[in-house]
Amino acid sequence: LIYFLLLIQKARNLFGENIKRKPVKNYNGEYFIKEIIPTFQGEGPFTGYPAIFVRLGGCNLACKFCDTEFEDFKKISQEKLVEEIKEKAQNKRKLIVITGGEPLRQHIGPLCAELISLGFNVQIETNGLIYQELPSQVFIVCSPKANSRGVYSKTHPLLVSKIGAYKFLISKFHKGYDAVPDLSDKNISAQIYVQPMDEYDEQKNAINKKLTLEIAEKKGYNLCLQTHKIWGIY
Ligand code: SF4
């Protein structure tokens, strides 16, 4: 019964049922961490790279299609976190992907700086609404999200020039996601990827894939798939 109740609780934290969490105010050398996983980057510009995923707890949004569990987190000091990353990287994983939830909810600048000083490459994945000062070497992938009315939230103005790649999810079944917002006035030099949203439904996924292909073809954007699901890894 307890296991069943835990499963229900876990399910409640997904698909738009998570608590919307505010940015963490003060940095005290600790982070809210959901998990630290050695794997391969499955999507975006570093697809296929051996990586350590550091999933931070909590998000400032609650997207209806979100299939990531990030609420069951615990506090870990930066020292312990870096030790665990080094141990799991075993000198063969050079890329650290800091994701969430929303990683910029927390003061990850010092963590990124330490990882870079140790010779790691650092990539973060953000929805783009919160700004944090980060070392210039951090590669920022921004995946903007639309609200329930289908209007895209504005990327934080201080973040825009630092974004290395945008990743837009494409779906016929979620308001706002059937097209990429107009970026022509933004003087963007970042790479732009379009990725079909996973609806956990074969027919819907086929429709999303077709639409993604059409958009990529029309706009000259890069195609992107969640290859970790094809490989059957995290
Ligand atoms: S921004 Fe990303 S992590 Fe946060 S709820 Fe939306 S899809 Fe999930």
Image (cartoon, helix red, strand yellow):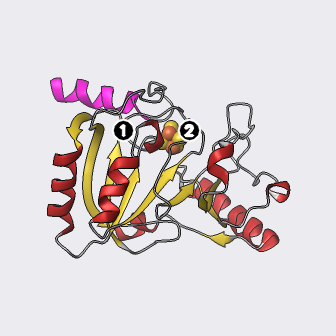
52 is higher (above) or lower (below) than 46: above
What's the amino acid at mark 2? Ile
Q: Position of residue 163 (x, y in %)?
A: 60, 58
Q: Which mark is residue 130?
A: 2
Q: Is residue 173 left or right of residue 78?
A: right
> From the Cβ of disc 1, is ligand 1 less than 8 Å away?
yes
C-alpha distance separating marks 2 and 1: 18 Å
Left or right of 163 in this view: 4: left
In front of the other: 200 or 189: 189
Q: Quadrant of the N terminus?
A: top left
Q: How many marks?
A: 2
Residue at 38% x, 28% y: name it: 26
Secondary structure predominantly adopted by residues drawn in magenta: helix
Q: Which residues are magenta?
A: 2-14
* Residue 161 at x, y percent in the picture: 66, 56
Question: In the rendered image of this protein, does residue 78 appear above or below residue 139?
Answer: above
Q: Nearer the viewer, mark 2 or mark 1?
A: 2
Q: Nearer the viewer, residue 17 or 51?
A: 51
* Front residue of 172 and 52: 52
**Residue 6 falls within the magenta-colored stretch:** yes
What residue does disc 1 label? 70
x and y percent of residue 158 in the render? 64, 46
